[in-house]
Image (tube, grey):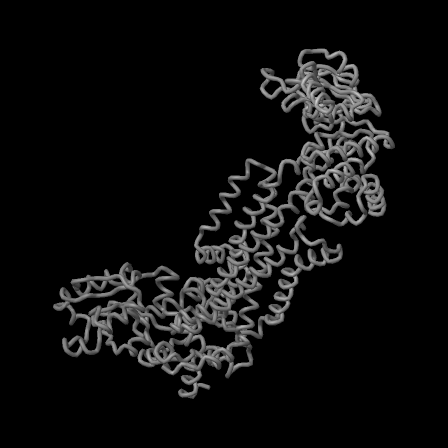
Amino acid sequence: MIQFTNISKTYDDGHTFALKDLNLTVADSEFLVLLGSSGSGKSTTLKMINRLIDPSSGTIEIDGANINGMDVVKLRRSIGYVFQEIGLFPHMTISENVAIIPKLLGWTKEKRSARVKELLDIINLPQEFAQRLPGQLSGGQQQRIGVARALAADPQYLLMDEPFAALDAVTRDKLQQELISLRAHLNKTIIFVTHDIFEALTLGDRIAIFHNGVMEQIGARQEILRGPATDFVRQLFARPAQQLQDFRDLSNE
Amino acid sequence: MNEQALIPFILERLPELAQRTAEHLMLAGLSTLIATFIGLAIAIVAFEYRRLRDPITALVGILQTVPSLAMLVFLMTILGCIGVAPALAALTLYALLPIVRNTLIGLESIPDSISEAARGVGMTRGQEIFLVRLPMAMPAVFGGIRTAAVVGIGIATLSAFIGAGGLGEFINRGLALSNTRLILLGAIPSAMLAVAADAILALAEWGIRPLKASDRPVSLGYQKFRRWGAASLPAVLCISVLLFYLHEHPVTARTEVLRIGSKHFTEQLVLGEIFAQLAEAKTKLRVERQFDLGGTLVCHGAITKNEIDMYPEYTGTGLSTVMHIEDVRSPEVALNTVSREYKSRYDLIWLAPLGFNNSWALLVTQKKARSNAWANISDLRSDAPNLHIGLTSEFAERLDGFPGIKRVYKLNFGKISDVDTNIAYKALAEGGLDVAAGNSTDGRIELYKLKLLIDDKHFFCPYQAAPVIRDDTLKAHPELAEIFDSLANKIDDEEMRHLNYLVDGEHQSPADVARKFLTDNHLI
């Protein structure tokens, strides 16, 4: 369980807020999507969990322990993180990339290569990719490796920062489906940041909507669609709903 | 001119060429290697401590702007010795700039997404640098090493000035002897080495580059082979050059060696050879030639620091340049003074003078001397306002040079030009100058048919040549005194001019000229 209590982030001593007074609880095994446009505070929220960004005020607890009291390196190694720009190390082979956290944790070579094998199977990539370099792979394949790297040390929590944003629509759809099936047999708590409403609706058990540093609403998909809490949320969903209606009308003509 | 044909010229020098090449590569290679480690460390410190970045890069940049020769001589003074150590130190300092700068740029130019990922997966700061930033900066680092190696091979040619050997040895000798071929024998291989080193490092750089999507997929084994093979290529070469160098420079017992030095002009090379061949003929000592040392202060530094055992020196130079004693006009007083002072100050012994006096001199052409009836310097007085004189800048400045001559002889020359010695002699012969300042034993006096005007007022300080030797060397080998005293008064001004002429004018090698002199005079 991850608990945000009164979290704010300001870069100019309280004149403007990247994030304001956030209270949020992420339940175990939940798939939570943080939805919003750029500058809404959703990525800031995510990065605070493994302390890539520190809050100006408030506390974050993971399983009851304040993360400020933890060793930052240990904390990060215990959390899986999938980066928006993939962030594979270009000079390391796929195998070395996937096994980076196990290596930092001091796993033996045998244990690491067994784990890499297992993960390549899980993300549906052929074993011979292990010895290639990231530059030799397509964008979609690279981000599958990014997911495998995040899962390598079998973390309880998986943070995903717009992981599919840079991919083409077909690949994105495919990876979304794979993530859903992955989740089905991996019991992880996933926090997923996106600006794509359909992606949020496809993946999230719950969706938290951010706007100008404020969390406007959090709830299950149906709750939000049926009962938008603010005008912003209503408008956010109204436009795609209208587009869908137009699409349906068009195909019924 | 009886120049040797090209092929024998090169063949004769092949063994030395190999030795000099090994020395050269050792100097450039080892200094680049040392600079790589130091440079990486400096770059990482500058990267980690942002406030140090600008001061460090500025400092390393300033090092680069110090003229090479000044740097060599400066380090020679600081380290207190001649030879390989100061040369390596100077080359290392020069190699730092490209390596530090490139490494720093490489470390800094990692995309934010990668550094965020490094932190995000839980790397410490050190792990981020050594596992991610530094490996990714490798192409830039290698670029820096390449530049450093190529520049190093170029600058290493100057190391010969302080007795570190290398291909510069040929260049120095060629410059001293005005022998273009010798200069090229040093310059061309050195340029070729630079090109080869660049190519080898380029190959290494290619080998360690990560593969891209556009590359043909290759097996892991080949990839590893390529990486390690390419990266170890420069290392393997460095090691083999070092081994060859050590093979060529075996560490032998000091006592069995007589190290003879010389400055880097013709007369000194001839005298050095005469000393060396005499010692080789009359003793069982192995003679080590440390010729072409930069100048008086380099030679003096070398002999007092026990880097060489002996070298030819001039009384006037010992007085003025080494001990700053001016205005000694009597040859006897000069010799007595240097003998006494060298012994008490430096534990050096002046052996018997060779006979000639290489002092400053005013020169005219034999033709003009005849037609104007010039024999003494005083004879110039009435003609001086119509005459054009050429001086080296040193002669023009020194009180025992032109200012003194002007005063003592009351000469007012019509036109005075600052010219290089080499040009002065030629200009004089061709009529561009009427009078030139030079040295009394210069071989070009004979070559250009010049006349030396007699210093009838005994203004010029005496510069008698004699072997200077370390006292402890003489104590270890007392027989050396007698051997070198056999040269006493064997070379007068005329003879020395002629020996110099044989080298400068007829392009014979100093070794040949020395051998002929020794055998003709039944000294060996």
Q: Residue furthest left?
A: B382
- Seen as rendered, the residue at the extreme right is A185
The residue that appears at 69% across and 42% down in the rendered structure is A89
Outermost residue on the front side: it is A253
The one of B343 and B276 positioned closer to us in this rendering: B276
The picture places residue A189, in percent across and down from the top left corner, at 81, 27
User: x and y percent of residue B465 in the render?
Assistant: 37, 73
Of residues B41 and B267, the one nearer the viewer is B41
Q: Is residue B489 visible?
A: no
Q: Toward which corner of the image does residue B497 lie, by quadrant?
A: bottom left
On the image, the x and y values in percent for residue B405 come to 22, 64
Q: Is residue B245 left or right of residue A73?
A: left
A93, B430: nearer the viewer: A93
Is residue B70 left or right of B109 when viewed as pictured?
A: left
Q: Quadrant of the C terminus of chain A?
A: top right
* Relative vertical location of residue B272 with respect to residue A121 in this rendering, above or below: below
Name the image quarter holding residue A9.
top right
Q: Percent position (x, y) of residue A143?
A: 73, 38
- Vertical order, B118 against A235 (above or below): below
Image quarter in which the N terminus of chain A is found = top right
Question: Which quarter of the picture shows residue A158?
Answer: top right
